Amino acid sequence: MKFSYGTAGFRTEASLLDAAIIGSTAAAALRSLELRGKTVGVIITASHNPVSDNGVKVIDADGGMLSMDWEEKCTKLANVTSKSELELLIKEYLVPSTFQPTVVIGMDTRPSSPRLSELSKVILDELSTAYKDYGFVTTPQLHWIVKLINQNSSYSIPSNPPPLVLYYDSLCNAYANIFSSFTVLHRPTLTVDCANGVGSLPLKELSKRLKDYINIRLINNDPCTSKYLNNGCGADHVKTTQSPPVNLVDKMVPNQLYASVDGDADRIIFYFTEKEKKFHLLDGDRISILLVSFLKILVQKSRLPLSIGVIQTAYANGSSTAYLKNLGVLTICTKTGVKHLHHEAKNFDIGVYFEANGHGTVLFSQGCLHKLWNPPTEKSDTETSAIVALLQLSQLINQAIGDALSDLLAVLSVLGSLLCDAKGWLSMYDDLPNKLVKVKVADRSVFVTTDAERRLVKPVGLQEKIDDLVSQYENGRSFVRASGTEDAVRVYAEAKTKKAAEELSAKVCGLLQ
């Protein structure tokens, strides 16, 4: 195997993953040592992949994704061919320190995860690393735990690790406060497709704790029967097929809201049907628009000088970008990949980012939180209510990474506060018809992009031909970018009508032949 650390860390068929587990665990211990003993995380998961796969990601000390320079080191550690080569690399990356490295680990419910977790602990023991095993947790839960440990000096590994119950306390208390203060006092009903993954466990806990506020019904929530994991269900399945998951086909109640999370519960998408069974998807673009619309209202009411920005990728629907412009919210486009969106979101007091697949969050800067906690002494009831709501949302929304559970509660709280239902949410704007196609190519490296992957630099002359095609269609837009994992390129096209979008897509694909 030749491993390459990417947005998903390392991911492959589970029986081939041992070297990646060894390299990633060593990288986590070495990174902790470099940061003078700060806690780093190792999560074993393959998210929405088939059950035969597994993967591993390293969580940096800020609770976010691994820093770029350590991605390269992690890749080298995972690709060694002998123990002696591994030892030489460890010595090269070792920073002399009197601090002990500390690591927390967790895993999803795949049958291969326990063995890989045990292998990770063997490496941590070999490197004299203190660690805490949190067992079955979602990826965002472990990100949240890492962030908490490094922000609160009262916690330490392994003597005083924070209990996972604090995660549930934070989410549930914030939601209860928002619900009681700003929403109509009725219990919304939400059916959640758990993808038969690890998210089933915390969703059961949330549904129990919040039973007085939400009626959460869980389906596809068997994390123990591995053959059902991501099988005809989960956020990725619903997004790509534009159809309900198993156990919901022909069973959806018209105009009632539904949601699906992915295998490790860091993505969520919503959907509903109308009486004629027409299926409507409420994806990451829609989540972003809903949240930022409410946040802008609260910021205006608070009268605090807070900047708001939305981060999108080239895959964001053109109508969503136009809506944000009309709303007066600054929009930034970045390369595809959560790490790029997260980085840009830090440049605002309140930064909102969601990929179309439903992975995203809202970041509240330290400066923003300081203003919220220390507002002007003389303020009206309206200003006070808005400030309190912003503070509660900052507690409800996972600041470390996209989190399906916290995003679920954030969406429900905003819908309730705006007195908005599924149809009202959908009506905020109309998506431009679009088509995404994968085209196999001999060598994807010849396709080089610029302008946040929206324009081709190479092959020379191809972008001009795409521009000529786009100019022939009303509201036309199209771009070509290389896949990050296989010799293929992805062609995205959108236009005013479905027929036009499909025509434009076919013509751009034709240029690639």
Image (tube, rainbow, N blue to C red):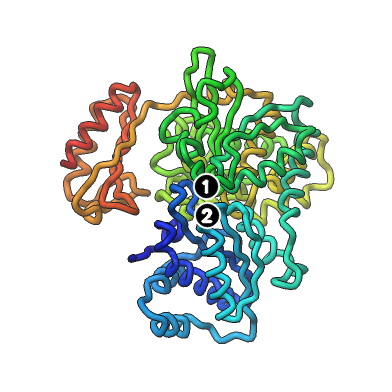
Q: Residue at x 79, y 39 (%)?
A: 177
193 relative position to 482: left or right: right
Q: Residues within 10 Å of mark 1 (few under 14, many from 20)?
A: some
**Residue beneath label 2, please?**
111
Image x and y of residue 143, in percent? 61, 57
Q: Looking at the image, which is closer to me, 456 or 251?
A: 251
Q: CB under 8 Å between callouts 1 and 2?
A: yes
Q: Mark 1 is on which residue type? A: Ser
Using the rendered image of the protein, determine whether residue 409 is visible from the camera's viewpoint: yes
Element under disc 2: loop
Q: Mark 2 is on which residue type? A: Pro
Image x and y of residue 361, in percent? 58, 46
* Residue 479 found in image quarter: top left
Q: Residue at x 61, y 77 (%)?
A: 129
* Residue 247 found in image quarter: top right
**Residue beneath label 1, please?**
226
Q: Where's the C terminus, which quadrant?
A: top left
Using the rendered image of the protein, determine whether residue 288 is visible from the camera's viewpoint: no
The numbered dot on residue 270 is none
Q: Looking at the image, which is closer to me, 383 or 64?
A: 64
> From the viewer's perspective, is residue 211 above or below residue 60?
above
Q: Residue at x 58, y 29 (%)?
A: 258
Image x and y of residue 277, in percent? 49, 17
280 relative position to 179: left or right: left
